[in-house]
Image (tube, rainbow, N blue to C red):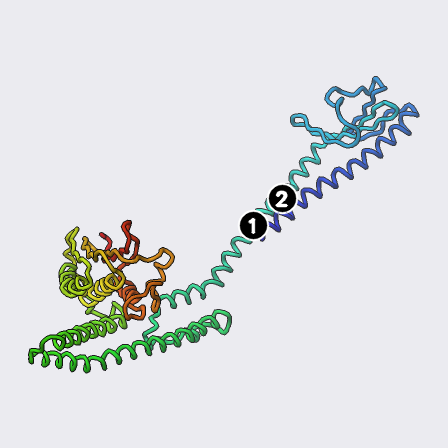
Amino acid sequence: MTLLVSGTFSLGIVAIVHAIEEHLVSQEMDHELNVVLREDLPRGQAPRLASDTRFFASDRREYEIPDQFAEVVEGFSEIVTGDAAYYAYVREVDGRRYMLVQEQHEFETREQALFDVVLAGFLLSVAGAWGLGWMMARRVMSPVSRLAQQVRHRDPLLAEIPPLAPEYADDEIGQLAAAFDSTLGQLRQSLERERLFTSDVSHELRTPLMIIASTCELLEATHPEGREHEQVARIAHAAEEMRDLVQTFLLLARSRSEDAACEGTSTLAAVAEEQRSRWEPQIRDKGLDFELRVEGPDSARYHLALLRAVMSNLLRNALHYTDHGLVRLVLENGGFRVEDSGVGIPEDQRERMFQAFVRGVEARGEGLGLGLSLVKRICLHQGWRISVNSLAAGGSCFKVRLHESF
């Protein structure tokens, strides 16, 4: 703004100086030429002019117009030749040219000095405005920066953190700090309710799950046959899945920094072999082929329950949405892929498939659309990355990257 205002003001001064210069000098020289033509020449007198002004006429030999001024147009003009500068005023009367030429070196010197002062004032104004603006901006933004730094390092789950508003004056920054305290309090309460709910539900579910598992073991000890054996096996399998889900939800309810249990305890190959024994019979019972392929060794260790939940949900998803062909689990160094020859996922729905309660247009199974959402939450919790693409031959490929080498 200072640059614009100062620049406009300076250019205005220069334009006004030039306009006044032309107007005043033109009027003065016109008056002097009138005196010469109406008074001095008719009386036979030499023109009464200042020492820096000369008179020329095309019809008088003693006042012959020099070649350097021969092409000057009628009216007022400024002439610059080398280091010399002149004002020229020309009037034509009955085909005769009369001219006054005035040296303007002294005026130009003063004019240049004025322009230098204007330029210096312009530069000083810009520099002063920049310096003052920088100081004021730092003074104004300092509490904002401090508040941002405090907000950045606040953990909404720590209830003992004192509020921020008392540290600031009762101004806009203080109101912003108070608004943050209020929002942080609401967020803390919401997160605390979620943590308590997840912990309580998970804790309360463990007892009935243990009872179900124990009952299944007792029933298995009676050696049931036929359909009874299948029902007991299904109950035991469902109880095991519930136990895994409870453990997964408990882990997701905590942050990684406060949960030492999130450290790796199992290899990718071990989890894959476990999931193979679990899902291959169901996949083959549906008339599909199952393939476990190892394309690269991976010796890293990952959290067993979380990796098991991700891989299990992806294999279940492939089983539900594949009617013919195969399901393939591919292990690589730093990750794995689950490929199928099923219905596939349209490109415009791939991101939405990871949202809770979202199911594809060809929804299968009895789920509520939480499987892929849970997978996404686990990956975000662990710093893993998951993506989905379509295969050239049809079907989908879910790719999970467990570390950067994949």
Residue occupying the far top of the picture: 61
Position above or below: 245 against 361: below
Question: The residue tagged with tag 2: helix, strand or loop?
Answer: helix
Position above or below: 59 against 203: above
2 and 1 marks in contact (CB < 8 Å): no
Q: Quadrant of residue 95?
A: top right
Q: Is residue 76 left or right of residue 331?
A: right
Residue 10 image offset from top left, x and y in percent:
64, 46
Residue 341 image offset from top left, x and y in percent:
25, 55
* Residue indicated by mark 1: 126
Q: What residue is drawn where x is 60% and y is 50%?
A: 4
- In primary-sequence order, the first of circles 2 and 1 is 2
Crowdedness of circle 2 by 10 Å Cα count: few (<14), some, many (20+)?
Answer: few
Q: Which of the pair 331/161 is nearer the observer?
A: 331
Distance from Cα at disc 2 to Cα at disc 1:
14 Å
Q: What residue is drawn where x is 32% and y is 65%?
A: 363
* Residue indicated by mark 2: 117
